[in-house]
Amino acid sequence: MSTQDIESESDTETDGSGELPQPHTIRLELVDEPGQLLSALQPIAENGGNLLSIFHERGNLTPRGHIPVEVDLECPPDRFDIIVDALRDAGINVIRAGAEHFGETVSLILVGDLVDTDLSHTLHSIEDGAEATVTDVSLSAPSGTQEPSSARLRLATRSGKTDEALAVVRDIAAEKDLHVVEPLTEGSA
Amino acid sequence: MSLKLAILGAGAVGGSVLDLADDYGHDVVAFADSSSSVSDPAGLDPGSVHARKERDGVVGDDDPHAVFDTDYEVLIEATPTTLGDAEPGFSHVKRALADDRHVVLANKGPVAERYGDLRALEAESAGTVQFEAAVGGAIPVLSTISDLGPSHVTAARGVLNGTANFILSRMAAEGLDYEHVLAEAQDLGVAETDPSFDVDGIDAALKFVILANVLSDGDAEYRLDDADVEGIRNVPGSALDLAAEDGRTVRLIGEATSSGVRVAPRLVPQGSALSVTGTQNIVQLETTHAGQLNISGRGAGGPETATAVLSDVSRLE
């Protein structure tokens, strides 16, 4: 085996066995001290993570008096646990680094007797069935429960799985006699 | 070259073709409504035909089918769209093609419901069939697809029902509910007394079924039954309010893609190409090598649709 062959093989391995990077969200708690954020981000970069966005809620404290920070990053699937371990080794409090990896967001509107058909149950069914997270809900029921109401949902779905998630929403809505105003995802056709 | 036209259907479209034919250098030699017809080998005078219809409720003294016995070259089929067997429109087309005459349709029925039958009859005839006016009124959708070649267009989507679009855009702009705006649209003559054809998405679906038939270019045949259709009756004002808060709006969008035909209210970004307002129509073509093409304009109305009919006639010369 030539040197070149060995090199190209090891390249493949650092790329996560050829698997594409996936987006992940990590929620951290930082102590309100200078340099904390930087020291939290270093283990991510050093272990092959690519930072996508950082949401630093400085005015908002967790019940323990810490500052919540949400980090969106991208990394090959086999790197994610290594990054989380590196963060914990560095003394960073990782609150949530679940198996969720959501890459796309999509908005839709549900119409119908949303309250009587148990909106909470509807949302849970969507999260469970569509492997999606409901990140935002706005309800408008101008006539109370007498007339159909509307709810705008924002769903975070796994990359490339938006169409499947929408199909699940359609099925759940049909069971409860609700209507879905779906987004026009241009170019998906 | 001047062609001799026979017009079946004395509604807004047929009447406008009668009025405008001369402007395109053609002669209308026969004209029929549902109960009568009139003909003149030297060309009819539109004014006197309209006057007779106004006065007596008929256009002439002959039977409607007498138009087929005249010396016409192109049949303009502008009778009301019917579903299922698409009669009597389909028989009109069949008769003209059997006599080796050309046919230009404004009637969507035969093209949407019996596309294969229509093409089979055309193949046996010296005449050809054109139907630009059946899709999007004055907007040159089919001629654009024909220029590009159907195999270079992977999808068509857009807004092809002015009534539903008027209602949705008024609801969004005024914060009014469906019933209010429907009543307003009926007062303005934008919506029919029975609006179901428009607001239930059937009219838009027929147009996208026709587009699907044209795009599949003989590989598959679509009918209205194959389309997944949802109208706008279930879109309350509150849904439009929530959409607007998020920078979006709701439009009755049709799609003709390789996976079939679908018409449904959809969320689209405010100010995007597909969020046309009022009775405006738009078609967006997805092309293989040239990205998206958007064509918009007036998708209904007598003179607008007659313009598409007469463009089709000119293509026959």
Image (spheres, coloured by chain):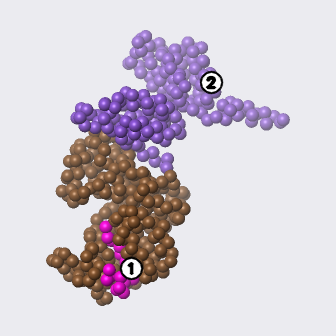
For the magenta stretch, what is the residue range? B65-80
Of all residues, the one furthest to the bottom in this rendering is: B42
Residue B120 visible in the snapshot: yes
**Distance from label 2 to label 1 (Cα)?**
74 Å
Type of residue at label 2?
Asn
Determine whether the residue tagged by mark 2 lies in a helix, strand or loop: loop
From the viewer's perspective, is B166 left or right of A15? left
From the viewer's perspective, is B238 left or right of B310? left
Residue B21 visible in the snapshot: no
- Viewer-proximal residue among B119 and B305: B119
- Viewer-proximal residue among A56 and B224: B224
Of all residues, the one furthest to the top in this rendering is: A64
Residue B74, numbered label: 1
Tell me the quadrant of the picture where the N terminus of chain B can be found: bottom left
Residue A170, numbered label: none
The crowd level at tag 2 (other Cα within 10 Å; few <14, some 14-19, many 20+) is: some
Q: Which residue is rendered at x = 51% and y = 54% of the image? A: B258
The crowd level at tag 1 (other Cα within 10 Å; few <14, some 14-19, many 20+) is: many
Where is residue A50? Give x, y as percent: 57, 30
Which shade of the palette goes to chain A? purple
Type of residue at label 1?
Val
What is the chain identity of the residue bearing mark 2?
A
- Viewer-proximal residue among B217 and B143: B217
Where is residue A51? Give x, y as percent: 54, 29
- Viewer-proximal residue among B27 and B59: B59
Determine which residue is flagged by label 2.
A47
Which shade of the palette goes to chain B? brown
